[in-house]
Image (cartoon, rainbow, N blue to C red):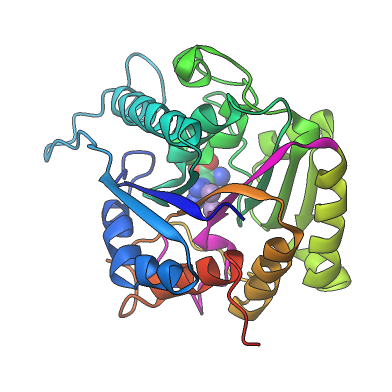
Amino acid sequence: MNKKISMIGVPMDLGQSRRGVDMGPSAIRYAGAIEKLQELDYQIHDLGDIPINRPDQRENLNNGTNLKNLDQVIEGNALLADKVDKEIENGAFPLILGGDHSIAIGSLAGISKHYDNLGVIWYDAHGDLNTGDTSPSGNIHGMPLAVSLGLGDERLTNILGYAPKIKPENIVIVGARSLDPGERELIQNKGIRVYTMHEVDRMGMSNVIEETISYLKEKTDGVHLSLDLDALDPVEAPGVGTPVLGGLTYRESHLAMEMLADSELITSAEFVEVNPILDEKNKTGEMAVGLMGSLFGEKLK
Ligand SMILES: NC(=[NH2+])NCCC[C@H](N)C(=O)O
Ligand SMILES: [Mn+2]
Ligand SMILES: [Mn+2]
């Protein structure tokens, strides 16, 4: 793995409706992310947080659409995309801390520029494959994967001036258990590979990740891990804004991260949706750091 990591916080909470997820980057740092990675011999450059324009009085600048806070989400993601782009150019591994999942729009915009066939592992209870037309909520954090496929509002899909960012056959979703009708249709039509909780239960995480690795290995030249903490079961990881029962365990997730570390496939990553206001003593932030450790090669022997 690239030993040079650039850490970028994105205190974004405008892609959804619950306050507090803007404190996610602080919670993850406070749980010891930098120390953990230093212990593993990485050289960490913490770039601090991207400034997010969050007026106290939420104006809901929808810009004539049903997408909540569209203007501010675009603004924040454009800044993030630029920063990520530059860090990769400098030879660093971008490690992005959220913030709600809408920030994957900016991450992927900045990352994918550098690859012909970027793979994406979307570790999430949700598909985040909605567009303005299919979204039940208007929350942009339910749309970043669709946006990255080039679907939805052009101001989102076109960040950094190109689209699409990724190809459907280069995506693997793991842990899904809440998919809206429009998302299911898209998965079918585009042939996106999804391991729902049903497959995880039947096959076991070990086989799921083994298949994921061999599926992506052949055709990608880099793989981004987008890890939404709500992939984990909310009994274990309560600090998330859109919890869904029946999720992945912390142990299972560790195994997944360890196998990904061994594969040496991952070239960028983000940890999103940690909401310390909804958490219990920063437990979810600590889990994010624990999983990060495994992803970056932490071993007991
Ligand atoms: N990143 C997330 N937690 N996304 C939750 C999305 C929930 C729902 N599918 C929606 O579109 O509103
Ligand atoms: Mn989710
Ligand atoms: Mn998500």
Q: Is 15 left, or right, of 117 in this rendering?
A: left
Q: Position of residue 60 (x, y in %)?
A: 25, 29
- Determine whether 44 is above or below 218 in the image: below
Instruction: Between residue 13 and residue 84, name the one nearer to us.
Output: 84
Instruction: Between residue 281 and residue 62, name the one nearer to us.
Output: 281
Q: Position of residue 102 (x, y in %)?
A: 45, 38
- Determine whether 70 is above or below 299 in the image: above
In the rendered structure, which segment of residues is drawn in magenta?
219-240
Q: Is residue 231 magenta?
A: yes
Q: Is residue 172 magenta?
A: no
Q: Is residue 95 in view from this perspective?
A: yes
- Determine whether 67 is above or below 161 in the image: below
The single residue placed furthest to the left in the displayed view is: 56
Q: Is 1 left, or right, of 220 in this rendering?
A: left
Q: Is 116 left, or right, of 76 in this rendering?
A: right
Q: Is 149 left, or right, of 71 in this rendering?
A: right
Which residue is at a point 62% across and 80% down the rendered structure image? 299
Q: Which quadrant is home to the C terminus?
A: bottom right
Q: Which quadrant is home to the N terminus?
A: bottom right
The number of numbered badges drawn on the structure is 0
Which residue is at a point 74% across and 30% down the rendered structure image? 117
- Determine whether 276 is above or below 45 in the image: below
- Image quarter for residue 38? bottom left
Q: Position of residue 26 (x, y in %)?
A: 27, 60
Q: Position of residue 287 (x, y in %)?
A: 47, 74
